[in-house]
Amino acid sequence: MIRIGLVDFDTSHVEAFTQRLNHIAIAESEWVEGAKVVAGYAGVSEVMPERIPGYRAKLLEYGVEIVDSPTALIGKVDAVMVESQQGNKHLAHAKLFLEAGLPVFVDKPFAGSLAEAQEMIELAQRQKLPIMSCSSLRYDPVITAAQAKQNELGKLLSADVWTPAALHEGNPGMLHYGIHGVEMLYTLLGVGCQSVSMAFTEQSEVASGIWKSGHVGTVRGIREGSYGLGLVAHYEKGQAVFQVEGAAFYREMLKAVVKMFQTGEAPIPYNEMREIIAFILTAEDSRKAGGVPIALA
C-alpha cells in the first residue's frame, strides 16, 4: 500500500482525492486501490485561504494525520501530491520531495513559468523519479470516447473545447481554470502547437492554436451563462460532440497517479506537460498584445 502525503489544502481536491483513495464518504464505484492518504500539511494560500480550515477539519475527520511542515511528511509517506492552487508555489514543494527521494504529483497548473516547469522536470530526471502534473479532465471518459471514435470516423484532426474560465491574479490567464480545457485539447492533439492567438473579453475568451499539421485547435473559456465542459472533435469523415457529465475524471486520474507511484513511470510525456504551460503563457502574451498570433516559446 502506497502511503501518500498531501501538501496545501486550498482546493476541494484534497477532500475528493482522500475520499477515493481511502474509501470513505464516497460510493464504492469511485474507490481507487493501491494507495492511501495518511498525512498532510495544510499550508497557506494566497488564492483561497478561506478553504483551508474546512478541508483541514475534514481530513482530520477522515483519519489523516496533519503535520506542521512539509518536511515533517518525509519518513511518513512514500509519495506526495502537491495540491496548492497557485502554480508558482509548486517548484519549492516538488523540489523538497524529489530531493528526498519521493515521486511527486503536482496538481494543475504545473508551474507559473516555463523555467519553473523545466526545473521540476530536470530535477525529476536527475533523481530518476517520476513527476506528473495535469488536470483530471484529461482522464474523463469523453476523452477516451473521442479517441475511440476514430475507429468509425477516421483520424482525429482537430478539436474545439469549451470550459469554465474563472480568472484569478494568483494564476494569470488560463492557468487558473481554463487549463482544464487546454489539458483536454492536448490529450487529443498532443504536442506540436506552433503559435497561439487569444480573443478576450470579460465574458469569455478563445485561444486558438495552430499545430504543425496545419490544423487549428481551440479552447473557449466561458465566464458568463452556462459553463460546463465538452468538445467538438473533427475527424477525416465527420464530427462528434462530447459533453462531460459527473466526476469520473477524479477516479480515472487517481488510478494513473497510483500506477505511477507503484511503477516509477510517468504517464504523461514531459514535453507535453511543458508545452501545455507554454500554450497558456503564450495565449496570455497574445491577449496583452491585442490578440495577435505569437509563436510558442
Image (cartoon, rainbow, N blue to C red):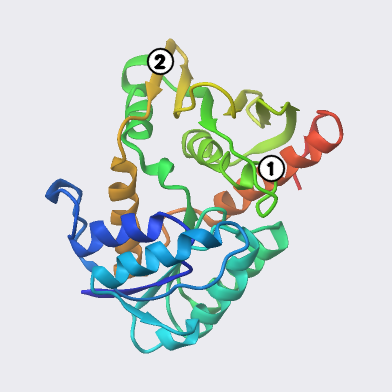
Mark 2 or 1, closer to the camera: 1
Which of the image's four quarters has the N terminus? bottom left
- Check the image and report above or below for 17 versus 119: above
Question: In this figure, which residue is indicated by the disc labeled 2?
Answer: 240
Q: Nearer the viewer, residue 213 or 9?
A: 9
Q: Position of residue 220 (x, y in %)?
A: 59, 26
Q: Nearer the viewer, residue 273 or 113?
A: 113
Q: For label 1, count other residues whose C-alpha is less than 10 Å away and answer few (under 14), some (14-19) or many (20+).
A: many
- Mark closest to the chain's N terminus, 2 or 1: 1
In the displayed structure image, the side of residue 201 where residue 275 appears, left or right: left
Residue 199 can be seen, yes or no: yes
- Check the image and report above or below for 17 versus 145: below
Which residue is located at x 65 percent, y 69 percent? 119
Q: Position of residue 232 (x, y in %)?
A: 47, 19
Q: How many marks?
A: 2
In the displayed structure image, the side of residue 191 where residue 239 appears, left or right: left
Helix, strand or loop at label 2? It is: strand
Q: Position of residue 159 (x, y in %)?
A: 52, 24
Helix, strand or loop at label 1? It is: helix
Q: State the CA–CA distance, disc 2 to disc 1.
A: 28 Å
Tell me which amino acid carries mark 1: Gly
Q: Nearer the viewer, residue 296 or 28?
A: 28
Q: For label 2, count other residues whose C-alpha is less than 10 Å away and answer few (under 14), some (14-19) or many (20+).
A: few
Residue 173 image label: 1
Tell me which amino acid carries mark 2: Ala
Which residue is located at x 48 percent, y 76 percent? 128
